[in-house]
Amino acid sequence: MTDIILALDVSTGKDALSIAKKTAPFIDAIKIGYPLVLAAGLEIANQLSDEGLPLIADFKVADIPNTSRLIAEEVFSHGFSGIICHGFVGRDSVLACVETAHDHGGECYVVTEMSHPGAVDFFHGGIAERIAGLVCETNADGIIAPATRPERTSLLRTLIGTKKILSPGVGAQGGDPAAIASIVDGIIVGRAIYEAKDPGSAAEEYSRFRT
Ligand code: 3DU
């Protein structure tokens, strides 16, 4: 089963709520992060939760364990069901996010390799593979891996087994949903849906890949 996860990076709460309502029948979860939360406040999560969809907090947490835990506590006390953290910060910081997520019945996803061109500067050469190993050691629920490089995401799949893969980079960043959907558990789509003239129809188009 491949989920469609809407990356709702709009800059007003009004737009966010309107797009969430139009797209809700065709998506499986909503991911929000700094763009919307800095504009509208974390309370927007409580309003979005009216759509009845899981909410994922994409703050790519990358701090010392204590600060990471404090961030994760805030996230889960606002109704999110998942959090995304970076893996390069190391075992103890990742563990802080994983444990806080699990204490709240939530999930933690760890960025192994990003989808943009510059990601190869640091994530390639063995780092992404080591982060995938850390994901298994820390009992994290899954990874974030690039739709723009399906061959890399396939390789990361061999390292994490049945843990979930959520994959950004489809649409605006050039990733082809047909090439990645069968490898991953969720494709993350932002601009190709929320910037479309009709976000509901755009989401419906992507829902073809929900197999
Ligand atoms: O490119 P889009 O507009 O479809 O948005 C992709 C979303 O996924 C966006 O929120 C971005 O911050 C997030 N993301 C990546 O694009 C790449 C990553 O490696 C991790 C997260």
Image (spheres, rainbow, N blue to C red):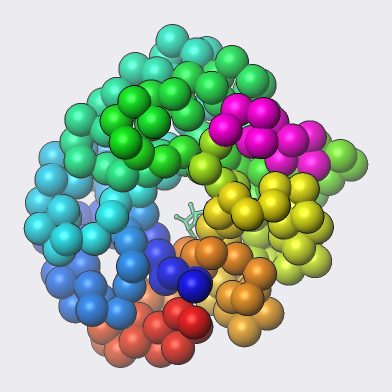
Q: Nearer the viewer, residue 106 or 41?
A: 106
The residue under the point 26% across, 26% down is 74
The residue under the point 56% across, 72% down is 170
Q: Determine if residue 124 is in view.
A: yes
As drawn, 122 above or below 114: above
> Which residue is farthest top?
66
The residue under the point 39% across, 31% down is 102
The residue under the point 30% across, 23% down is 73
Q: Image check: 30 left or right of 22?
A: right
Magenta stretch: dominant secondary structure? helix
Residue 43 at what x, y percent from top left?
14, 40
Q: Image check: 133 left or right of 29?
A: right
Q: Determine if residue 40 is in view.
A: no
Residue 141 at what x, y percent from top left?
52, 43
Judge whether residue 68 is colored magenta.
no
Q: Image check: 26 left or right of 49?
A: right
Residue 85 at what x, y percent from top left?
51, 35
> Which residue is farthest front?
162
Magenta segment: 129-139
